[in-house]
Image: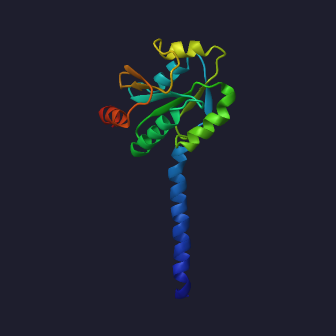
Amino acid sequence: MLRHYPARLSRALVLFLSGMLLSLGAGAAEQPVRPFVAGTLQKIVAERQGKPFILALWSVSCTHCPEELKTLARLKQANPALDVVLVSTDDADESPRVRELAQRFGLAAVPQWVFADPAPERLRFEIDRRWYGELPRTLFFDRQHRVEAVSGLVPPERLARWIAEHVR
């Protein structure tokens, strides 16, 4: 009888730990890729009233976007309170590829959007009137939702400094 006790205990421990891991992972479920249309930015901002967040604009065909997304994923993992929203500037037809890349880069659990307007210029203008489509484009929203926009790769130190100043 005592001889089987360690095996039973091991099985019970494995079941317990498996349950704990599943419950921890429940909060990090993969997000669907939703259509980004006129008015979506206002909705995203309203849902985060009084909270800082980063809006990362990217594309599956962008050369530098994978590096930016990997950096954001590392920072999100190190700072779970960091709110990152991904917006792909690709057509809605690219949703499966957008989802796949976000998953590959470790960002499947953050809100994801893809442009879904036949005239993407309207969406770009709504997001930032000074933006002409260059990617990656990162918008930093502080608690008052003042926006700082950066085109191109944002140095990891710059991202880390913004997180230290705005995310608690």
Colouring scheme, one of rainbow, by chain, secondary structure, one colour: rainbow
Q: Is residue 107 shown left or right of residue 146?
A: right
Q: Position of residue 93 (x, y in %)?
A: 69, 28
Q: Could you tell me which residue is drawn at 51 percent across and 69 percent down?
A: 13
Q: Could you tell me which residue is drawn at 40 percent across and 39 percent down?
A: 81
Q: How many marks?
A: 0
Above-or-below relation of 52 to 19? above
Q: Position of residue 104 (x, y in %)?
A: 57, 44
Q: Is residue 30 visible?
A: no
Q: Is residue 42 shown left or right of residue 161?
A: right
For the residue pair 84 and 135, the one nearer the viewer reads as: 135
For the residue pair 129 and 30, the one nearer the viewer reads as: 129
Above-or-below relation of 138 to 20? above
Q: Can residue 70 be seen in this view?
A: yes
Q: Could you tell me which residue is drawn at 56 percent across and 29 percent down?
A: 62
Above-or-below relation of 168 to 41? below
Q: Position of residue 157 (x, y in %)?
A: 34, 36
Q: Where is residue 152 in the image (x, y as percent from the top left)?
A: 45, 26
The C terminus lies in which quarter of the figure?
top left
Identity of the residue furthest to the right in this view:
93
The N terminus lies in which quarter of the figure?
bottom right
